[in-house]
Structures are given as structure tokens and as C-alpha cells.
Image (cartoon, rainbow, N blue to C red):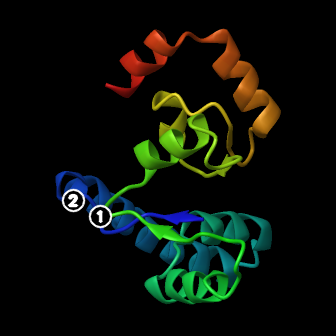
Amino acid sequence: MVFDGRPLPAKKNTNDERRQRRTENVKAAELLLSEGKINEAVDKFKRATSITLEVVESTIEHFRTYKNVDVIVSPYESDAQLAFLVNEGLADVVVTEDSDLIAFGCEKAGLPGIGLNKALSFFSKTSRTDLKTVGG
């Protein structure tokens, strides 16, 4: 298991904007809930979800108790590291919400809402050169 480390300093503005959107989504969800609009509120609450440091730390501690599970914490974002581990055969698959893995040429990335087969199908139809162009 590979976890992201610290936020990249270069993405501070992006991360601040995401944090602000999550806060706004919570407020909107609470208003919708008070109006009895349960389904719409649930959607807003989902958009406001973030994984806390406490959840990450307890997950890391939990999986470190297993002898057959390696746990790695990247210094910053782990996209390039994950792509390398999968492409070198050191990891079997990546399950992520981050589509950046495709841009890094990760051959086995499962994206929620897309699924591994569809993600792999996209990858097989797109050359690595195209993906690197998308990734910068």
C-alpha cells in the first residue's frame, strides 16, 4: 500500500480551492437536509468528503501489522511512484480516484466510476507518448 505524503507546495492554491469547495458543499448539504431534500444533501455530503490524517494514520498502522503487506508513505504525491511500482511488476494494481496515474503511464489503474477494464481499455488505445503529453 502506498500513501501520499505531504501536499506539494506548488499545489497550495489548488488544495486551498478544494478545501473551500468541500466547506461550501457541507453548508449546501446542511441546507438541503433542513429542506428535506435528502438525496441532494447526500450528493453534496459526498462531494465534501475528505480523508483525515487520523484515518490515514490508523490505516497505515493497521496494515503494518500484516507481514505480507508493504506500506510505503511517499514524501509528497505518490502518482509517479505508483506507476513505477506497477509497471515494474512490484505492485499488482492501483485503485485511486486520481486520474493522474494514466498520465504517468500506469498500466493497471482502477478509477472509481470508471472501473479497471474501462481504464485499461483507454490506456491500450492511447500511446504512451500521448499520455506523457497529457501528463506534462
Q: CA distance from mark 2 to mark 1?
A: 8 Å
> Residue 18, position in %: x, y?
38, 60
Q: Is residue 136 left or right of residue 60?
A: left
> Residue 122, position in %: x, y?
68, 20
Quadrant of the drawing holding the C terminus: top left
Q: Considering only vertical position in the picture, is 115 above or below 36?
A: above
> Residue 26, position in %: x, y?
52, 76
Q: Considering only vertical position in the picture, is 21 above or below 51?
A: above
Label 2 belongs to which residue? Answer: 12
Residues tagged 2 and 1 counted as in contact (Cβ below 8 A):
yes
Give whichever of discs 2 and 1 has the lower sequence position: 1
> Residue 8, position in %: x, y?
25, 58
Label 1 belongs to which residue? Answer: 7
Q: Is residue 29 left or right of residue 14?
A: right
Quadrant of the drawing holding the N terminus: bottom right
SS label for mark 1:
loop
Disc 2 residue type? Lys
